[in-house]
Image (cartoon, grey):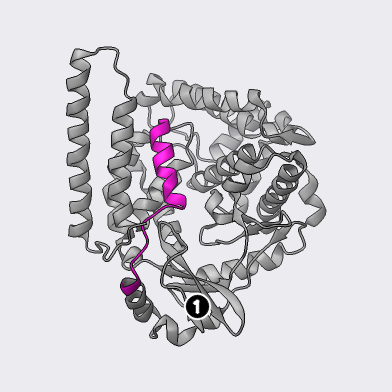
Amino acid sequence: MKTIDSIPTGKLGRTGKLVSTGVKIGGNYLKYYGKKAFNPELTRDELDEDNATDIYDGLKSLKGSALKVAQMLSMEKNLLPGAYVEKFSLAQFSVPPLSAPLVRKTFKKYHGEYPEDLYDTFATQSVNAASIGQVHKATKEGKKLAVKIQYPGVADSISSDLAMVKPIALKMFNLQAKDSEKYFKEVEGKLLEETDYVLEVKQSKEISEACAHIPNLKFPKYYEELSSERIITMDWMDGIHLSEFARQNEDEELANKVGQALWDFYMFQIHGLKQVHADPHPGNFLVDKDHNLITIDFGCIKQIPQDFYEPYFSLTNRENLNNKEFFYQRLYELEILNENDSEKEKEFFSEMFHEMFTMFSTPFQSERFDFTDEKFWKHLTELSEKYSKDPELRRMNGNRGSRHFLYMSRTFFGLYNLLHDLKAKVEIENFRVYL
C-alpha cells in the first residue's frame, strides 16, 4: 500500500483538501445529471459510488477526526447508501500508513528517542493504519510488542475538523444549529480523549483488570514505561479481526462462544462498571486460535451517569415502556420531551421513541436471543427508513435526547451489528453471574 510522507496539520491545508473534494463531488453531480437527461431510468448507484470514493480519498489523506467520522458513519448501515458504508468501512482497517521516515520523525518528536533506541527491534512498516494512529511490531527482552503511534497534528486539528464536517452532520441528522452544541461538544470531548494515550493506557488497564474473570476474554498487557501521551506499547496479540472470523466461520458453537464473550463483556461494563467501550467496530477485536475474544483498543470509553442509566434501562422493561405515565416521565428525564413542546410534538416524539425503545430492547425480552433474527433486522431497517424519510420529522427540531444517547446508541447498534455478523445466539442474562 502507498505510504504518506506528510499530513496537512494546519486549518488552511485541511480546509483546502476538503474544498478540492467538494469540487470533485460537484463534478460527479454534473456527470450524473448529464447522463440522466438521456436516460431517465438511471439510478443514483454510480453517483453514490463516485461520491463515496472521492469523500473517502479526501478524508484518508487528512486522517484524524475527519476520518474517524467516516469510520463512525460506516457503522450506520441503515442510514447511508451501501456505497458509502462499503467505502467508509475501509477506515476501520485499510488506510495508507505513514512512511518510514515520517514514523521515525514522529516517534522522536513524541518520545524524545528514535524507536530503535527504545526497542530491540522495530518494524518501520505499519501492520495496521486507522484514523488516529497506526500500529508497528516491535520486540524487547524477548517480548513481542505492538506499538501504536498517533498521527502528527491529530489532537490539534479536532476542533477545526469538526467545524468543517458540522454542516454535513446537521443536514444528515436533521439537527438545528442553535441547539446542537451539546452533541458536538460530546463528540469533540470523546475524540480529544482518544488522542490522550496516557488516559487510554489507564482505561485499558482498569477495564481489562475489572473484566479479567469473564470467560473467553483476553487483553494485552500495557507498558507505561514505554508509552507516552502519543505512543502506546502493549503486548502483541495473535489473532484475526472479528470481521474476518465472522466471514470464514461456519461453526455455530464457535460463533455463539465468541458472541457470548462479546455480550458479557459489554453488559458487565454497562451494568457493573457504569462505563463502556463505546467503539464496537470489528477492528478493535481479535479472535485467537482458541477462539477467545481479544479487545485491543480502549481509546473511546463512555461514562454512564446514574441519572441517564436509570431511566434509559428502565425502559427495557416492557411493562414500564407501555405504562404511558411512566414512559412520559422518562422521556422528560432523558431530554426527549421538554416543557415547551406542543401537543403535536409530544405525541410525535413519544410515538417515535416508543418505537425505537421497543426495537432496541427486543433482545432483552428473551432468555436467549438470536441476532440473525430476520424479523428483528427487518424492523430495524424499516424503522430507520421510516424516520430518515419522514417529512413531518424534517419540519420539527431533530435535537432530541440527552447527549449521552450519542455514544450509547452507537455502542448498542455497533454491538448488535457485530453479533449479527457473527450469527450469534447469546444468553441475555448470563453476564449477571460475573457482577
Quarter of the image for the C terminus: give it. bottom right
User: Could you say which quadrant of the image residue 47 lies in?
Assistant: top left
Asked if one can make out residue 363 in the rendered structure from this viewpoint, the answer is yes
Magenta region includes residue 90? yes
Residue 373 x/y as whole percent = 67, 28
Percent of width and height locating residue 302: 55, 55
Question: What is the number of callouts on the image?
Answer: 1
Asked if residue 81 lies left or right of residue 363, the reply is left
Q: What secondary structure prevails in the magenta region?
A: helix
Q: What range is drawn magenta here?
A: 81-101
Q: Which residue is mark 1?
A: 227
Quadrant for residue 49, please give it. top left
Please say if 291 is above or below 149.
Answer: above
On the rendered structure, is 118 left or right of 141? Answer: left
The amino acid sitting under disc 1 is Ser
Residue under the image location 46 percent in, 62 percent down: 194
Foreground of the two, 377 or 428: 377
Q: Which secondary structure, mark 1?
A: loop
The residue shown at (51%, 81%) is 226
Residue 279 appears in the rendering: no
Across and down, in percent, residue 96 comes to 36, 57
Q: Residue drawn at (29%, 36%), measured in percent from left and top?
A: 51
Q: Quadrant of residue 149?
A: bottom left
Q: Is residue 253 left or right of residue 87?
A: right
The vertical placement of 230 against 432, above or below, is below
Quarter of the picture holding the N terminus:
bottom left
The stretch drawn in magenta includes residue 214 = no
